[in-house]
Image (cartoon, grey):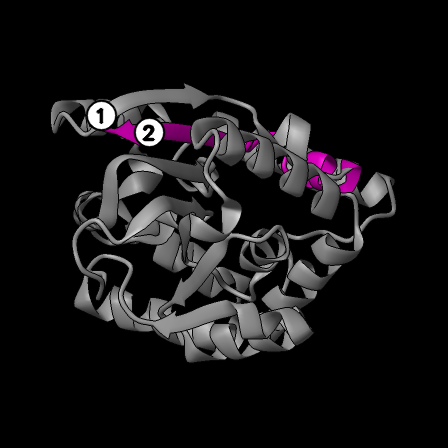
Amino acid sequence: MQNISEENRAYWLKRAKGYSDVNKEELAGIQRQTWSKFLIEMIDEHFKGKDRSAIKILDVGAGPGFISIILAEAGYQVTAFDFAETMLAQAKENAKETAEKINFVQGDAMSLPFGADSFDVVFSRNLTWNLPEPKKAFQSWLSVLKSGGLMLVFDANWYTYLIDDDKRKEFEKDRENVKQSSLEDYNIGENFDTMEQIAFEMPLTRQKRPEWDVDYLNSIDAGEVSSVLDIGSLLYSEKEKINYCSTPLFMVRLVKG
């Protein structure tokens, strides 16, 4: 697993520019509106009467900054956290003048460098599938989240086609539909085979999610847990819906007890 972790880090360090292009597309597309509206409504509803400037949000695995940027623009206190320096550099560039409102921190998502009860909201998108020790990560995230705080985890059953023949057929059908629609295929690119090798070794590739997440968080009495199986139907662009039809984005929502 140590070798896989090192390969994983090396992969994402090199992937920053290409991944940033995807974030730029989101910032320029319908996703800026869908994600902003959804997250603002959810956060403001949970913290009724609290000024946004007083709500501290940790974006774990911030990557090139899409979520950190839209939340900072909305007026929240945002910390963008990522293990790849190259990702944070892209995030600062993408944020432009908004970068002054964001705290950028590099570190390990499975061992956060923050004190207990530091944040009102812990957010994560498309990260947990890629962690060698997801249970350790959840424990670390909960430790920095205030009592009554909100944890929002967005992810999908990425790469299950590596171990499931039926999912392989669905994945290949997605590739054909993308091609027929004359769209860019997000699942084809430089070093994609490297990511498949890494994903094959990751523990969550073999778990059914979000059931695994909900069961684990309930097993440690983390708080009030719920999930939505296809939140991507509300948040994705049409291009994303076609690309990821067989791998719907889910949400796990937790209010810390």
Q: Is residue 105 above or below residue 134?
A: below
Residue 108 in percent (x, y) is at 26, 66
- Asked if residue 9 lies in the magenta stretch, the reply is no
In the rendered image, the quadrant that contains the N terminus is: bottom left
**Residue 146 seen in the current view:** yes
Amino acid at pointer 2? Leu
Q: Which residues are magenta?
A: 238-257
Of the pair 179 and 103, the residue shown nearer to us:
103
Q: Residue at x 51, y 46 (%)?
A: 52
Give the crowd class for mark 2: few <14, some 14-19, many >=20 residues within 10 Å.
many
Q: Residue at x 28, y 24 (%)?
A: 214
Residue topped by disc 2 = 254
Seen as rendered, the residue at the extreme left is 220
Residue 24 in percent (x, y) is at 71, 63
Of the pair 55 and 125, the residue shown nearer to us:
55
Q: Secondary structure at mark 2?
A: strand
Q: Secondary structure at mark 1?
A: strand
Q: Residue at x 50, y 43 (%)?
A: 51
N-terminal of the pair, mark 1 or mark 2, is 1
In the rendered image, the quadrant that contains the C terminus is: top left
Q: Is residue 39 above or below residue 87?
A: above
Residue 102 in percent (x, y) is at 50, 67
Contact between labelled residues 2 and 1, with CB atoms less than 8 Å apart: yes
Residue topped by disc 1 = 223
Label 1 and label 2: CA atoms lie apart by 6 Å
Instruction: Please count the marks in the image.
Output: 2
Q: Residue at x 35, y 38 (%)?
A: 151
Left or right: residue 139 compared with residue 212: left
Of the pair 68 and 6, the residue shown nearer to us:
68
Q: Is residue 218 above or below residue 30?
A: above
